[in-house]
Amino acid sequence: MSRLTCHYIFIISFLFFVDQSEQQKLLNYIDGYRSSFKFNQQGNMNLIISAPHGGSLMPNDLPDRTIGGCLRQTGICTWWFNDTCIDGKRCNSTTVKDTLSDEFAENVANELSIQYSLQPFVVIGKWSRMKVDFNRESQEATLNHPEAINAHRHYHANIQQAIQKINQNFRKGLLLDIHGHGVGDYTMVGYLLTSDQLNKNDLNTLSVTTSIDLLCRSNREECIRGQNSFGTALESNQLGISYPSLANPKPGSLRFLSGGYITKNYISEINAIQTELPYNIRTGASRRTHARNYAKAVVHFMKQNNLLLSN
């Protein structure tokens, strides 16, 4: 056997074992209620990753949420799948899919495991947003259909279970809710602050609750758009422009989404951040690299803020 042949065999063998090693570090998932979502509850760190809007499964026995709710004279929308709304006007439901946000979230989780041996808790939606919206309160999310209610309840029960494990084992942690948008080439980092609030000069003067008050304490400026902020970590890891960040502290007149039901619902128990990622970050040819860089940004942010813990 020639020296060149031996060299090729060594390279192929090395790549095979590297691939096998990476495969062993991929997270394993269990399907939730009727495969409406999948989850990993075997986390070894104090991070939860949620991705509610990337699913595409369309169970036939559930109504489409496109019918919306019904606005009557009370001025309040009610949400019933069998409401003909003859005596009112329809309220719109949002049903747009965050394309490949589910794959991106899974890739981020895998990169944390492969690169850092850190395994987050993960909950990823599989049913289409046309059938259930895991990032809305139950009535709007499900149109009060029993099967959609069950899926929604189980999705959030898995988030709640992960929070309980994190608080029991680590006493503090972070919930990242991953979404996608198509309104521009920038990432929106949501802390429950509107664009008008972020456009203020001093966030410490705002008399509102943010989604990371447990972490920020008295210095919101540094925590939300300073050197140690998550937006700055994303920008430092080749993920484009993020609002807010040290370099881009104010979104100005750009469209900005501040965080939804998942971000709001758990902030008394855990820090939470919503990221709305642009289309090219989560769908382009480099999306696996972007997921690796996102994972790197997560680790950097959590270390910089004395938040990263594992067992």
Image (spheres, grey):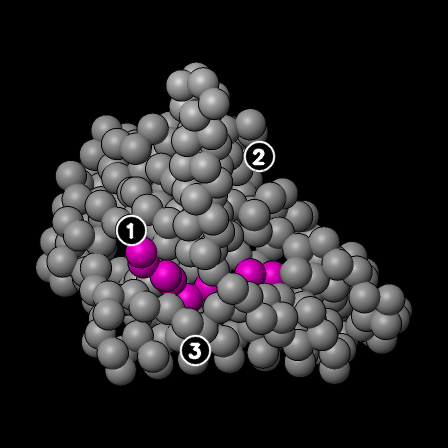
Distance (Cα) linking label 3 and label 2 = 29 Å
Whether pointer 3 and pointer 2 mark residues with C-beta atoms closer than 8 Å, the reply is no
Provide residue 175's location: percent of width, then percent of height. 37, 62
Q: Considering only vertical position in the picture, is 287 above or below 47? A: above
Q: Amino acid at mark 1?
A: Tyr
Q: Does the segment drawn in magenta span residue 189?
A: no
> Foreground: 2 or 169?
2
**Disc assigned to residue 116:** 1
Number of the front mark, 3 or 2: 2
Distance (Cα) linking label 3 and label 1 = 25 Å
Name which residue lies at 21% across and 34% down.
Answer: 246
- Residue 18 located left or right of residue 103: left
Q: Amino acid at mark 3?
A: Gln
Secondary element at tag 1? helix
Magenta range is 117-125
Q: Which residue is mark 3?
A: 160
Q: Which residue is mark 2?
A: 283
